[in-house]
Image (cartoon, grey):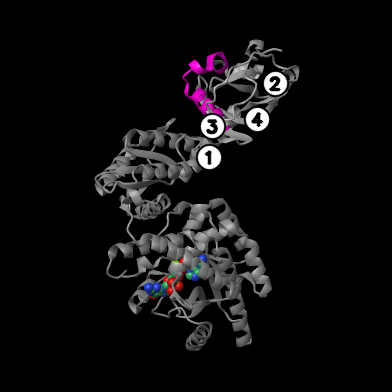
């Protein structure tokens, strides 16, 4: 009977009825069934008797001797805390009169914390006819380690080993709890957004991206000081929180330190990379700080910092703008589902003849409560939310359907083209070629009656996909206009090889072109570029006769703007064309 000490079987016959009752241990031997029962248990188990007003270990199995040697060697003499804990539990169990008791024990070992789930139960001692306590200890150390490592994964970023978004929130909660009665300290949060990090990943591969993140994490770690905690809260976002004892100035000082440390170029293998970051901050009295709210506020500020290039501090109202966007999104979703959008048609004029060659279809939305919402407000919301796919499909169908209606009204095909705007997000998310082909087929329209307007961002975002799409359009006789030309970053050389029909000069060059020589120079350059590439040109935003005449004289093909007409309803557009075509004949 390995692990059982025969000498140990000398406990008293009965458990005391009350704690502290004196008893004389009577020497006896453990019955065979006790011993085999004990050794049959997979866990550490011991039987405890009572002697001189205190529990003592009577017998135990080999597992118990292995796991708890100090306890059985000379338990009373050992002052370790976990032993005291087990003894206290045994005494409390005996006193409670309950049939069972569970408790957990933890102790430090050279390999880390060990944990045991323990059960105490009364068992009959058939030998002397009394009762004993059976202690059963289940080793949970391995489970705990798994739990701990899962937990570590849950709260930390695998690349940098910094806390992640969840860990960041928890650490903030802990700090807030420590300052429950502190009325003077504030909690500041900084969001450091690495701009164009996606480009590094794209251009150099994700290994280089990882290396960059690690270098930045190391730099940030080195500069934040002991009162701040850093976390990686998103792919290209770091979060920092700081106990700001001097309020906002602590936060700004830290933000400036971060900005300075990140402004030095970073060496990645044989490349040197400059990192641009946008930093947004938020601040709240620490005792009633809400971690999620602070992070959201700092993120809102960092979005503003992206444009301003400065460190931005959250101001009330900015989150309001984000909520407003959400609100707008849900109303727009409804409007699209209920057919609540319309198209307006702005004439495109051939400058040399003054004739109408077509119309640009522009989305219009009048909401019951919000009134007229400008495309400048709802198109970005549609793009951000993905609703642009639905909106864009609707716009192409609606515009072609309108052309078909005009044909019917005219009794013949009207000699007009309709231009429809296509967002780069549509190209990324929709099968635009199939969508346009379906719309043409459904409305029995030939491709030559349609112009698609794209902005340069479509070319920049996914040049390969965009080129393939343009070639499909070309084969279907659909014209393509490069909208808002001059404001984007497209590579001029790439234009040459693309099947583009029209360059639409952005309104910003046309406005005040006659008094601003720089604008005039840009317009001349664009016109000559277009001519070299064999493309036509449209000037957007012509608001007076002088600009129209000057553009015509410089060789610009088409014009569009309030001078000719504002965007019109379908009926007014038809009448506009009729009156102009009468004029022309
Ligand atoms: P865009 O495609 O460049 O359209 C021209 C914008 O300039 C229109 O603004 C038009 O009303 C305005 N405009 C035209 N002539 C003048 C002028 O003489 N002076 C001034 N100040 N403005 C003029 P709108 O309708 O507000 O549309 C804004 C932008 O929203 C459009 O710019 C286009 O990018 C986008 N958009 C509109 N409808 C759609 C659509 O159905 N799909 C997509 N993807 N985008 C659309
Ligand atoms: Mg346009
Ligand atoms: Mg435009």
Q: Which residue is mark 2?
A: 128
- The residues bearing labels 4 and 2 have C-alpha atoms spaced at a distance of 14 Å
Q: What secondary structure is found at the residue carrying circle 1?
A: helix
Q: Which of pointers 2 and 3 lies earlier in the amino acid sequence?
A: 3
Of circles 3 and 1, which is in front? 3
Q: Which residue is mark 4?
A: 122
Ligand 3 quadrant assignment? bottom left
State the extent of the magenta-drawn residues as a range.
Answer: 71-93
Q: Position of residue 391 (x, y in %)?
A: 56, 68
In the rendered image, residue 504 lying in the magenta stretch gets the answer no
Label number found at residue 537:
none
Q: Which residue is mark 3?
A: 92
- Please state which of residues 171 and 54 is positioned toward the viewer in this rendering: 54
- The residues bearing labels 3 and 1 have C-alpha atoms spaced at a distance of 37 Å
Q: Check the image and name the residue furthest to the top.
A: 7
Left-right relation of 113 to 191:
right
Q: What secondary structure is found at the residue carrying circle 4?
A: strand
Q: Which residue is mark 1?
A: 154
Residue in view at x 32 percent, y 35 percent: 226
Q: Which of pointers 3 and 1 lies earlier in the amino acid sequence?
A: 3
Residue in view at x 52 percent, y 21 percent: 111
**Label 3 residue near ligand 1, CB within 8 Å:** no
Quarter of the N terminus within the rendering: top right
- Please state which of residues 438 and 257 is positioned toward the viewer in this rendering: 257
Q: Position of residue 234 (x, y in %)?
A: 47, 45
Q: What secondary structure is found at the residue carrying circle 2?
A: loop
Image: 220 above or below 399: above
């Amino acid at each position: 009977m390995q692990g059982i000490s025969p000498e140990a079987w000398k406990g008293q016959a009965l458990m005391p009825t009350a704690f502290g009752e004196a008893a004389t241990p009577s020497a006896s031997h453990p019955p065979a069934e006790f011993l085999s029962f004990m050794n049959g248990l997979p866990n550490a188990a011991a039987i405890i008797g009572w002697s001189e007003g205190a529990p003592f270990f009577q017998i135990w199995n080999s597992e118990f001797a292995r796991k708890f040697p100090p306890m059985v060697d000379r338990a009373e003499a050992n002052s370790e805390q976990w032993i005291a804990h087990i003894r206290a539990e045994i005494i409390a169990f005996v006193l409670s009169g309950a049939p069972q008791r569970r408790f957990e024990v933890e102790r430090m070992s050279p390999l880390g914390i060990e944990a045991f789930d323990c059960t105490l139960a009364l068992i009959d001692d058939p030998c002397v006819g009394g009762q004993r306590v059976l202690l059963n200890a289940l080793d949970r150390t391995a489970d705990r380690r798994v739990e701990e490592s899962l937990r570590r994964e849950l709260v930390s970023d695998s690349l940098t080993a910094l806390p992640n978004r969840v860990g960041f929130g928890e650490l903030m909660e802990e700090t807030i709890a420590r300052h429950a009665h502190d009325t003077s300290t504030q909690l500041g949060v900084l969001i450091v957004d690495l701009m164009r990090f996606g480009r590094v990943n794209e251009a150099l591969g994700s290994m280089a991206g990882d290396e960059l993140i690690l270098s930045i994490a190391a730099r940030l770690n080195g500069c934040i000081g002991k009162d701040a905690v850093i976390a990686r809260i998103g792919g290209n976002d770091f979060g920092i929180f700081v106990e700001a004892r001097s309020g906002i100035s602590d936060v700004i000082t830290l933000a400036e330190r971060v900005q300075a440390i990140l402004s030095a170029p970073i060496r990645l293998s044989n490349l040197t990379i400059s990192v641009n970051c946008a930093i947004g901050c938020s601040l709240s009295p620490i005792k009633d700080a809400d971690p999620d709210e602070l992070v959201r506020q700092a993120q809102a500020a960092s979005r503003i910092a992206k444009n301003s290039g400065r460190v931005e501090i959250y101001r009330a109202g900015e989150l309001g703008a984000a909520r407003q966007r959400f609100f707008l999104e849900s109303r727009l979703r409804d409007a699209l589902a209920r057919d609540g959008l319309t198209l307006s048609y702005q004439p495109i004029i051939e400058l040399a003849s003054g004739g109408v060659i077509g119309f640009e279809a522009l989305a219009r939305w009048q909401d019951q409560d919000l009134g007229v919402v400008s495309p400048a407000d709802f198109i970005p919301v549609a793009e951000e939310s993905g609703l642009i796919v639905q909106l864009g499909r609707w716009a192409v169908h609606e515009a072609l359907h309108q052309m078909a209606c005009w044909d019917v009204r005219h009794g013949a095909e009207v000699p007009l083209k309709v231009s429809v705007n296509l967002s780069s997000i549509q190209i990324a998310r929709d099968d635009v070629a199939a969508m346009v082909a379906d719309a043409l087929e459904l409305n029995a329209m030939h491709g030559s009656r349609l112009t698609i307007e794209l902005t340069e961002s479509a070319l920049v975002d996914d040049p390969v996909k965009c080129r393939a799409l343009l070639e499909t359009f070309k084969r279907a006789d659909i014209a393509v206009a490069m909208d808002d030309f001059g404001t984007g970053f497209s590579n001029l050389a790439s234009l040459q090889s693309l099947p583009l029909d029209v360059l639409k000069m952005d309104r910003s060059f046309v406005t005040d072109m006659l008094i601003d020589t720089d604008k005039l120079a840009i317009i001349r350059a664009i016109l000559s570029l277009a001519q070299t590439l064999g493309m036509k040109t449209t000037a957007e935003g012509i608001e007076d006769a002088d600009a129209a005449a000057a553009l015509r004289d410089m060789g610009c093909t088409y014009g569009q703007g309030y001078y000719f007409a504002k965007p019109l309803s379908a009926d007014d557009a038809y009448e506009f064309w009729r009156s102009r075509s009468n004029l022309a004949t």
